[in-house]
Image (cartoon, helix red, strand yellow):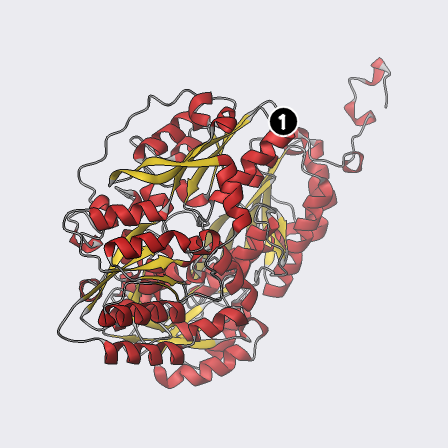
Amino acid sequence: MKHLTEYRDAHIVRRVLADITRETRDDRDYVMMEVCGGQTHSFVRSGIDRLLPERVTLVHGPGCPVCVTPLETVDRALAIAQRPGVIFTSYGDMLRVPGTSGDLFSVRAQGGDVRVVYSPLDAVKIAAENPDKQVVFLAIGFETTAPANAMSVVQAKRLGLKNYSVLVSHSCVPGAMRAILTSPGNRVQAFLAAGHVCAVMGFWEYHPLAEEFKVPIVVTGFEPVDLVRGVLATIRQLNEGRAEVENAYARVVSEPGSEEAQKLINEVFELGARAWRGIGEIPDSGLHLRDAYAEFDATRRFDVGHVRSVESTRCISGEILQGRKKPHECPAFGTECTPDHPLGATMVSNEGACAAYYRYAQDVEGAERAS
Amino acid sequence: MNTDPANAAFPKACPTPLLHHDRIVLGHGSGGRLTASLIEHLFQPLLSNPTLDRADDSALITCGSPVSGALAVSTDAHVVSPLVFPGGDIGRLAICGTVNDLAMVGAQPRWIAAAFIIEEGLAIETLRTIVRSMRTAADEAGVQVIAGDTKVAQRGKVDGLYITTTGVGVVPSGRDTHASNIRTGDAVLLSGPIGNHAIAVLAARGDLALQTDIRSDTAPLNQLVEAMFETGAEIHAMRDPTRGGLAASLNELATSSRASITVDEEAIPIDPDVAAACEILGFDPLHLANEGKLVAFVPERDAESVLAAMRSVAQGAGARRIGVVDDATPGRVAIRTPLGATRLVDMPAGELLPRIC
């Protein structure tokens, strides 16, 4: 933990914040999106969002894998998990995500065998130990979880497991960034790119975006010192009229990323369109199982491809995920929609913007200050 | 084994002493000889005291000194998986949980009644270890287990063993720790590092892929509470932050007293291993359960003497001042981050869920 303490040093953060304040011009606005939900949480938890100059606006991005998982995927998960003879495995924070009727917790309460795993390889282990059961893993996430999820499929194939399958809902960051930049009414001038995603993928993918849309993209980490350094680098680029891909998280991220992990992802998955909860379909923004691994596709194995779902009209998570609205601008925020009774996934996940606001900044003064 | 049909009508000729079983069978809860044997060979010797040993249908207790204050009564059902974890087990937990609930209202815990619901098939040796551990905890706390009951449920209907304990304590006159006593200006004191119990139990379940030496803090707090009262200070309010952690306890107190509680993030002690586990799993240490910690509200003028008294007792060795009651956010809990910004601390929602990445 000593290693991390260094990146939480309040003196360093204050010094960088002073630089930010000094270099922020008062004749212009700075609108930047932190892509990852983990960054949103860290901003709000540390209170940095309230210490930034008025002219700097943080727009909370769509980078929470739980929040952007389409309702349809959740409903398909619920349909599979209810089947007898199925052990349904998932990362913990998907269990409370509301589907059209109930969540995975309620399936478990009704007798479904729903288990939290910390890694998809644990799900493979469960499959090997329970040959008479069908074990399904809900494979969601960004590029960060894709290598492990791909590995589980490769391993199941190697072991010859016929009772393991994955319900895939993977999302990719560059496609989502492009969708935000091309959406009408976009306000985002720059991105704080998600450090963990870049640790896997590198940042070579971002050069075309920075050039085409003339936006600075600064690879940013998650600790307070990382965050303010990312913000400062972004402000400097905007001041100087530069639009470059810059690495402010060099202690973890390199330009090529992990080539081994990328190879594994490409072996199992291919890029394609996918639906983002609350946003809709975005081209080239998802990963799908390649034909060579189609036998591991839970959608086919359980024939739930026909399940279609309609979003609640009361939840504005789509506008929040695209940075058009702040959580407290939603009429249901904190009243009809709370972490105990979430209407949408942004209120469920630890990394969801609504949950972050509810937990850390529910006082309107702070919430407004952050907007 | 006696197979002579002539003896079949005389079951006494074929005794089935406890020692012939190494596991609990349904008969141990039948109320018959197996039950009696379990009590005679296991519960009674391990928990022995004159009141329990009378073996009546009810325990008869004499308060001794005239009770001028109130009697405090608390009951708590204990369910934990696994039954034994680093730093404790369900037996220690069952004593400490109830002792601590009594101590939080200023009571001096005296007597405990315990009901055991045991799963058919539980190893007798496991049960013995757990009951022995109850005795150790009861001795540490200075309480007696004076009544008990045992039921056995079919395999699969109970997760090993559930223990419900009911405790009775005597409240010396003048003690009142109700939340409504909290006043603006009160200092908020915490008896030691938080989160160890929750992480120890999670790690002991073996599904965290987490190697850790973290031990549960399960311990009776009544001696710590006595040391605090002995200073002569007014203890305005006390809570033991168990399920829901410090965040839940502080929020409950803020809500019911309408007080504004502001704590300092850097002042809250957290062991490095616990902090690291939280980091990896995405838990907030403020949401993690403790079983041997308390948070107290005392007038500022008494804060230093109470802190010194807390630190003089093993259970309070790591005591710290963590915050103050102000008037910034009535009914709410705020936390000052190391950067000097302030955010709210909310009640944790439902089950702890490890985050995805």
Q: In terms of depth relative to the viewer, which is nearer, B219 or A353? A: A353
Question: In the picture, which quadrant includes the C terminus of chain A?
Answer: bottom left
Q: Residue furthest top?
A: B5
x%, y% of residue A217?
32, 60
x%, y% of residue A60?
27, 56
Is residue A22 positioned above or below B197 on the image?
below
Q: In terms of depth relative to the viewer, which is nearer, A316 or B58? A: A316
Q: In terms of depth relative to the viewer, which is nearer, A23 or A83? A: A23
**Horizontal relation, residue A196 to residue A240: left or right:** right
Task: Please tell me in which quadrant of the rendered image residue B176 appears.
Answer: bottom left
**Horizontal relation, residue B50 to residue A137: left or right:** right
x%, y% of residue B187?
36, 78
Task: Please tell me in which quadrant of the rendered image residue B261 appears.
Answer: bottom left
Q: Which chain does the residue under circle 1 lie in?
A: A
**Horizontal relation, residue B205 to residue A21: left or right:** right
At x 28% / y 56%, what residue is drawn? A211
Mark 1 is on which residue type?
Gly
Residue neighbourhood size for the residue with mark 1, other residues' Cα within 10 Å, grouped as few (<14), some (14–19), many (≥20):
few
At x 69% / y 48%, what residue is drawn? B44
Q: In terms of depth relative to the viewer, which is nearer, A148 or A264? A: A264
Is residue B39 positioned above or below B283 on the image?
above
Task: Please tell me in which quadrant of the rendered image residue A130 appears.
Answer: top right
| SS for callout 1 | loop
Residue to which mark 1 is pinned: A160
The answer to whether residue B245 is visible is yes
